[in-house]
Amino acid sequence: MSNLAVRVEDIGKQYNIFTESTKYTTLRDKIVETIKKPVSTLFNPAGSEKFWALRHVSFTLEHGQVLGIIGKNGAGKSTLLKILSRVVEPTEGIAEIHGRVGSLLEVGTGFHPELTGRENIFLNGAILGMKRAEITRKFDEIVAFSEIEKFIDTPVKRYSSGMYMRLAFAVSAHLEPEILVVDEVLAVGDAEFQRKCLGKMSDVASEGRTVMFVSHNMSAIQRLTQECIILDHGKMIMRAPTAQAVDYYLTNDFAGDGERKYSDDEIPTSAHPFKPIAIRTIDKAGHITDNLVSTDPITIEIEYTLAQDITGLRVGVYLMTSRGEYVFTSFDTDEPERFQKYSVRKAGHYISRCIIPADMLNSGRFVIGMNASSYMVKRYFADERAINFNVNATGAPGMQWVELRHGPVRPRLDWTIEER
Amino acid sequence: MATTTLDLKKKPAMVVIKPSKGWVGLNLKDLWIYRELVYFLTWRDIKVRYKQSVLGILWAILKPFMSMVVFTIFFGNFAKIPSDGFPYPIFAYTATLPMEMFTNAMTVASRSMVASGSMISKIYFPRMIVPLASVMSSVVDFFIGFVILIGMMLFYHITPTIATLWLPLLILLALVTALGIGFWASALMVRYRDVGYIMPFLSSLWTYITPVVYPASMIPEKWRVLYALNPMTGVVEGFRYALLGSTSSLSLPMILASSGIAILILISGLFYFRRMEKQFADMI
């Protein structure tokens, strides 16, 4: 018996982008055009440019497999998930889905603030495709999972955001789909909630159900998936066992030589007023390079402009190994004094610079992710793998032995040997 | 795999996803699978509509009733518009009641797709359900307003006849028209928000071209079938026939003309809606 869960063949999705020049046609032009060809205007948006968000993507997935989907912002990950969950229609190609698709990306869809928790469970369940009998059967379980028993007959507009999310998640989590689609990038909510999402995902995966998981979090990808596909500019670059795919993803396709410049078309409009210019790594001598030495300090520079003042902005880096494990996270306003001083960062041109002290990193390849956000307010810009660099451990502690030292760091520790 | 809760005995349904070309089929099968959603969305619309209003369900009575009072004072008493020999208040109310339902259903349905934007851009279900549920929710108001009508019939000592049995079909005729317009308008509104401004205007215009404050018998006989190309003419005159026994204008050709156009509006609306459906998630 064929155990096929998903078969995707040559799927493509074309979007219309309304360009500046066509957006501002005069009303007169529009009317003239409509009179000339009334029917086509009714059915097709006039004057638009087309681009492929996704093209020539093919893969199959067996029941019980957990597939990771990785790629940069705008690589087509979310488009793929939307096609597979039938929200958008592909422009070309064909996909077969064997079984019910549920997704953890539309948590709380259709919730109405005026309705009570009980009413929303039924409504949301129906929207997600559950039968009424099924919802009735799972009702107690959903309520228990969401821990809101006392407020079940209170309108959800009186719920705290935590209660709201718990209830919404509980309904989604009890859908029990054959195929689960998770877009972590779109997942909202606090860390606790995200943990719950991931926890539920591992449960589902360990139950032997099929999961497709989109994430920028390489350690989550490695924990949960066995195989990954990598998307880039709408194309599928590779499908490989997770370890191999993550390594490829994190270390390939970078603007090399220690500097990554951002062109305008790479910056999403949501980043405004933050505009990244470049991120670079600099050695002790002040040269921009991606070959760095463990025993020297390493400078990381982020250059950016702010079109407007931003309150509470923090610009910082994640350091990851090429296997996607986090080494550390650090922001330019971590120090309370600096946080006070830059509580409002004025519009202007900035460089945020930090130094990784000498004798810190082990040899190997490292990846720097960049993040500019205001805590709990907005994430302006994030590039999870902005740049990478090599560390050469020549002269580092313990080099007299040729063995491989475990761990991403190789600090020079203050050992003493006491003779008694 | 041993602990899987997946019921592998029954083969999971397969869905094929591919681009739909041109005028797509209606896909009524999916509509059937999701039939419970129609119920839930209708129920939500009704519940939400009255949840935060002081007078609540009374609005359903007040709106047609106040229209009737105003019409009676100005058109019946001052303008002395004939009412086919019936007391003007009940003559007007038998018309405002279905007309109110129709314009209400049409307006709510036209807004429904845009209003459900967040749902549509995140999850799949047959999109037709959205305007359909909006139209259904308007029926509730009608039945509440109907209670007043019964009261008025008792007051004026009008005994219902066997013709009352036509009512369900007439209600259906009004709903079919409203749904057809709703499909057209809601699909258009996804792209052209202008439709939102047109709808109130269309509603009042439609009320004027429908024999609500005046009888259809005022229209010259040779034009009446043409006049009945407005499906609401058939509905309103049908109501007067079914409830009051008015026979001064209604004819079989008129009802056929109204029904024919209503079905045409519904079917064309359905196909236009389905044709546009694949773009909704991209545009909302």
Image: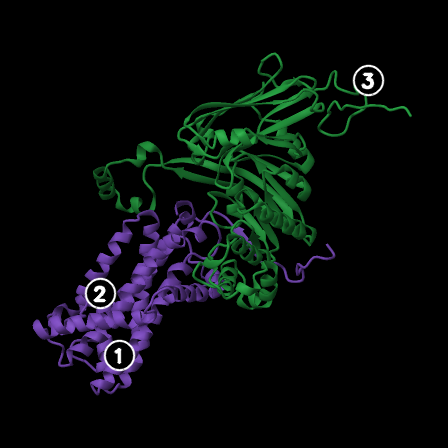
In this rendering, position of residue A39 left or right of residue A5: left
- Name the amino acid type tagged 2: Asn
Q: What is the x, y in percent for residue B105? A: 31, 64
The quarter of the picture where residue A23 lies is: top left
- Name the amino acid type tagged 1: Leu
Mark 1 or mark 3, which is nearer to you?
3
In this rendering, position of residue B220 left or right of residue A199: left
- Name the amino acid type tagged 3: Gln
Q: What is the x, y in percent for residue A329? A: 61, 32
Q: In the rendered structure, the residue with mark 1 lies on which chain?
A: B
Q: Are marks 1 and 3 in contact (CB under 8 Å)?
A: no
Mark 3 or mark 2, which is nearer to you?
3
Whether labels 2 and 1 belong to a single chain: the reply is: yes
Q: Is residue A330 above or below residue A412?
A: below
Query: In this orientation, does residue A158 appear?
Result: yes
Compute the Cα span from label 3 to label 2: 95 Å
Mark 2 or mark 1, which is nearer to you?
1
Q: Earlier in the sequence, mark 2 or mark 1?
A: 1
Compute the Cα span from label 2 to label 1: 24 Å
* Chain appearing in purple on the rendered image: B
* Chain appearing in green on the rendered image: A
In this rendering, position of residue B60 left or right of residue A156: left
Q: Report which residue position mark 1 lands on.
A: B149
Q: Report which residue position mark 2 lands on.
A: B230
